[in-house]
Amino acid sequence: MATGLQEADGFAVSKPQSWHKCSQPNTVLRVAEDTLVVFSTFPDLETARRIGQVLVEEKLAACVNLIPQIESIYRWEDKLESSSEVLGLIKTTTWTYDQLEARIRCLHPYEVPEVIALRVQSGLPAYLNWIEQTMQ
């Protein structure tokens, strides 16, 4: 299959000359200025599920992925610690972040819960639109 180079929103992207509906890649890079992925760890799956469900029910998150059995190594109160935790990947928006952070702090059993937000640079437009629509 021959390929050509096209420009989309200032980015050079490769685009196959012939397309199939199901295999067509997203060639336009979309900057998702309002989309965030928030990382938060939890002591166990039950706690992570409970908090994740509240965040989605209250429309503070569009989706929460739970990754069980991660190992965290950290320093707490000047002691080296290690614990098994559950990582939550929380999809949200910039306009709900402050409420999301406050709700996690309120519900979370840790004295200082991990709440780290990363801005999404690009993604599948349909998915990013779904996040935005779900949050309204």
Image (spheres, rainbow, N blue to C red):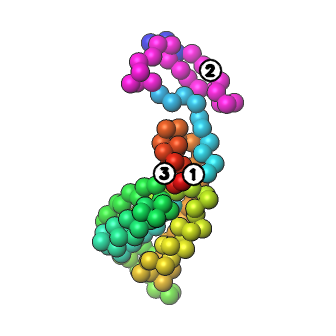
In magenta segment, residue 19: yes
Query: Among all residues in the image, which is located at the extreme front?
Result: 136
The residue indicated by pointer 3 is: 134
Please provide percent x and percent y for residue 21.
Answer: 41, 21
Give how far apart the Cα atoms at labels 2 and 1 are: 26 Å
Is residue 135 positioned above or below 27 on the image?
A: below
- Foreground label between 3 and 1: 3
Callout 2: SS? strand
| First-in-chain label (2 vs 3) | 2
Identified by mark 2, the residue type is Gln
Residue 6 tag number? 2
Residue type pointed to by label 1: Thr
**Residue at the image position 57 percent from the left and 15 percent from the top:** 4
Residue 84 rendering spot, x and y as whole percentages: 33, 72
| SS of the residue under disc 1 | strand
The N terminus - image quarter: top left
Q: Residues within 10 Å of mark 2 (few under 14, many from 20)?
A: few
- Residue named by callout 1: 35
Q: Residue furthest bottom?
A: 77
For mark 3, give the secondary structure: helix
Q: Residues within 10 Å of mark 3 (few under 14, many from 20)?
A: some
* Residue range highlighted in magenta: 4-24
CA distance separating discs 3 and 1: 12 Å
Q: Nearer the viewer, residue 36 or 54?
A: 54
Asked whether residue 3 is in view, the answer is yes
Quadrant where the image shows the C terminus: bottom right
Q: Percent from the top left, x then y, of residue 16?
A: 50, 17
